[in-house]
Structure formats: C-alpha cells, structure tokens
Amino acid sequence: MPRSVNHVASRRRRKRILKLTKGYFGARRNVWTVAKNTWEKGLTYAYRDRKTKKRSFRALWIQRINAAARLEGMSYSRLMGALKKSGIEINRKVLADLAMNHPEAFSAIVKSAMNGSAPKKTAPKAAPKAEKVEVAKPKAEEKKVEKTEEAVAEKE
C-alpha cells in the first residue's frame, strides 16, 4: 500500500506563506525554505518595531512640546513640572497637537501652569457621618477619678 501524505494541506500551507512573501527580492519570494525564514523574520521585526514606534512618537511629541514651550519662555522639563504641580492632567500627545495646531490654546495652558491655577477637582460627597454615642462610664470608675482628684488637692 502506498504511503498516504496529506498533500492538500501541506501545499495549502506553503502556498499561503508564498503568497505572503509576494514582492520580496529574488529567492525570498519563491523558494520555500528561504521564503518561510524571511516571513518569520519579518514577523519578529514587526513585533519589535511596534514597540519602537511608540518610543519614537513619544520622542517626537516631547520635541514639539519643548519647541513650543521655549517660545513661551520656559523649558520642557519646567513646563511638565508646573503642569504636575498645578494639577493639569494632559498627555504629551494632546499637548504636542495643541502646540502644533492651536498655539493660542497651548499658551493658555502654559500660563495657567505658570500661575499654578488649575480647575479645582471636586471630590464626591461623602456619606453623612454617624453621630457619636457616648457610653456611660461605670460608677466605680467615677469614684476612682474623684478620689485621685481629692488626693492631688490634699498634697497641694
């Protein structure tokens, strides 16, 4: 009996990866082992660069905020410290967008941070406190207190 191989599934698997490597240079697109290795390596690059992209955008936002802050007469670090002290919670992405597209709004934020005035946060109302109930002291303790007061008065 001849050997049974699931040729349909293995061909479909190879075809899928060769379809994904379409556009690669030379043997990277049509030689199975080279194409498979190239495709797998591309996945690792994609994973790595998704993280790198976040870092590079944050650096870009910081550069834009720094440039706009220096036009207002303060450095980036002083601006971020003033924002934190005044309680203004706004992220770098939005600050950079304001600095680029709405400079008047950015300068208003800088001025409010420099003055230290920020919109006051209102705390949620707390439940009313329960009244304190005084517990009556036993009479024996009251007598002890009176005796010690009398002893102190006699010594004086």
Image (cartoon, rainbow, N blue to C red):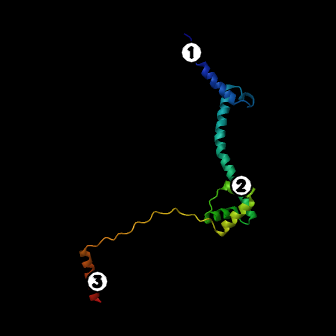
Q: Is residue 34 visible?
A: no
Task: Tell me the CA gap for discs 1 and 3.
Answer: 106 Å
Q: Residues within 10 Å of mark 2 (few under 14, many from 20)?
A: some
Residue receiving disc 3: 149
Q: Residue at x 75, y 56 (%)?
A: 101
- Residue 5 appears left or right of 63: left
Q: Residue at x 74, y 60 (%)?
A: 103
**Which type of secondary structure does the marked residue at label 1 adopt?**
loop
Question: Disc 3 to disc 2, how far (Cα)?
Answer: 74 Å
Vertical comparison of 46 with 54: above or below: above
Q: Is residue 15 visible?
A: yes
Residue under numbered circle 1: 4
The crowding category of the residue bearing disc 1, from other C-alpha atoms within 10 Å (few below 14, some 14 to 19, many at least 20), is: few
Q: Percent position (x, y) of residue 84?
A: 62, 63
Mark 1 or mark 3: which comes first in sequence? 1
Q: Position of residue 75 (x, y in %)?
A: 70, 63
Inspect the image, locate mark 1, and give the three-letter code of the amino acid beneath it: Ser
Residue 97 image label: 2
Foreground disc of the pair 2, 1: 2
